[in-house]
Every structure is written in structure tokens, then in C-alpha cells.
Amino acid sequence: MIKELLKKKERYAHAVGPAIRARRKDMGMTMQQLADKCELSSAFISLVERGKSSFSLVSLQSIAEALEVEIGYFIDVPEGEGLVHRANKPEYLDIDHPVKYRLLSSQFPNQKMEQLITEVPPHYRFPYVKREGEGFIYVLEGRLAIKIGEEETVLDEGDSVHFDYQMGVDTENPTDALTRLLWCGSPAWLHQNLSENSDK
């Protein structure tokens, strides 16, 4: 049992970057072509592939779409046991990442949004994101600096923001303490496979 847990930890500690690189090369795609398709920089793609930079789930989803796979190709998403999530049984995305992602959304056909509680470490900055869809952030604890388009502001505990990702979004925990956020976003992509299979 201990060996299995260690193997699982090792898999998620090292799999995302190499998996992106392997998939990209299998498709005969250059780093620049991938960057152009997902509206990210080739320098960022290079760092992620080499495990030298972290990434947001939103940017990973953009990479997955550009590589024509689901996000589950790179990370393990809990399947859950129903529509209700109990506080005493939290489910986290199994991914080696500075940010902890607790899953709140359920799985059902054709869902339109995802919900997560994110625990953002001190001074962590998310990569710039510009994509289709909407986002909503409510600060549960701590502080979040956010830039949407050209507008910059700081959100404190109890503050919230609702935005269009097409405007371009930069977010950062500017403090020396942990920041906890409720994040909701559309379209749904963590459970994309279930929604697509329901139409077949």
C-alpha cells in the first residue's frame, strides 16, 4: 500500500510537463504552434514542459484543448459519489501544484460550470489567462490582487468579482499569508468527458 502511494505521488509530481511535451510532439506541433493555439507564450510552455513553472487549471485546460485531449489526460479528477459534497469528506484534485484545489462541483450530463475552493500560497501569481467563458471569485480568507483587462483592484475577505475571461485576467496573492477563494467558472471542463459522452 505504501509503495502504491509513493508511486502515485511520483506520477503526479512529474507527469504533467512531460505529458504535454509528449502529446505535442506526437501531434507534430512546435512549442510556438501550441502557444499560439492556446494564447500563451512559448516561453511559458517551455517552462511548464520542463517542470520549471507552475500553471493554473484554466491555462492547463487551454493547453489540453489545443492538444485535443481532456484535462483528465494530465490530472486525476475525483469522480465523486453524488451531487452532495460533505465537509468531512473533501475531495482534492490529485496534482503536484503550489495551489490546492478542492472540488465542489458534481458530475451530471451537460453541466455548464465548475466550482472549486482554491488555497493560494503567499506571493503566488497565477499565469495570465485569456479564454472563452466567465469567472467568479469570492475571497473566503486573505487578499487577492486581480487585473481584468486594464482595471486593477485588490479583493479582501468577503469581496467578490464576476468577469469575462476574454478580457484577460491576472491574479496574485500579494500577502505573506494563505489566501482561500471560492472560484466558479464556465464552461465546465473538469467533467467534460461525462458531458460529451451523455450525448452519444
Image (cartoon, helix red, strand yellow):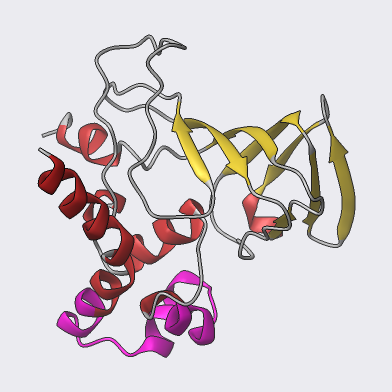
Percent x, y of residue 124: 67, 58
Percent x, y of residue 120: 63, 46
Residue 103, relative to residue 3: is it above or below? above
Left or right: residue 117 versus residue 33 is right
Quarter holding residue 129: bottom right
Q: Is residue 103 magenta?
A: no
Left or right: residue 197 versus residue 177 is left
**Quick one: 39 or 152, which is closer to the camera?**
152
Percent x, y of residue 88: 42, 11
Residue 112, relative to residue 163: is it above or below? above
Q: Which residues are magenta?
A: 22-47
**Quick one: 82 or 8, which is closer to the camera?**
8
Q: Residue at x 51, y 38 (%)?
A: 186
Residue 24, relative to residue 83: is it above or below? below
Left or right: residue 165 versus residue 39 is right
Q: Residue at x 34, y 11 (%)?
A: 83
Percent x, y of residue 108: 28, 21
Q: Residue at x 55, y 46 (%)?
A: 133
> Is residue 113 visible from the viewing direction of this image?
no
Quarter holding residue 111: top left
In the picture, which quadrant includes the C terminus? top left
| Total numbered labels | 0
**Quick one: 11 or 113, which is closer to the camera?**
11
Q: Residue at x 39, y 34 (%)?
A: 92
For the view shown, which residue lies furthest in the front direction? 2
Residue 174, relative to residue 190: is it above or below? below
Left or right: residue 137 versus residue 156 is left
Instruction: Identify the main secondary structure in magenta.
Output: helix
In the picture, which quadrant includes the N terminus? top left
> Is residue 5 visible from the viewing direction of this image?
yes
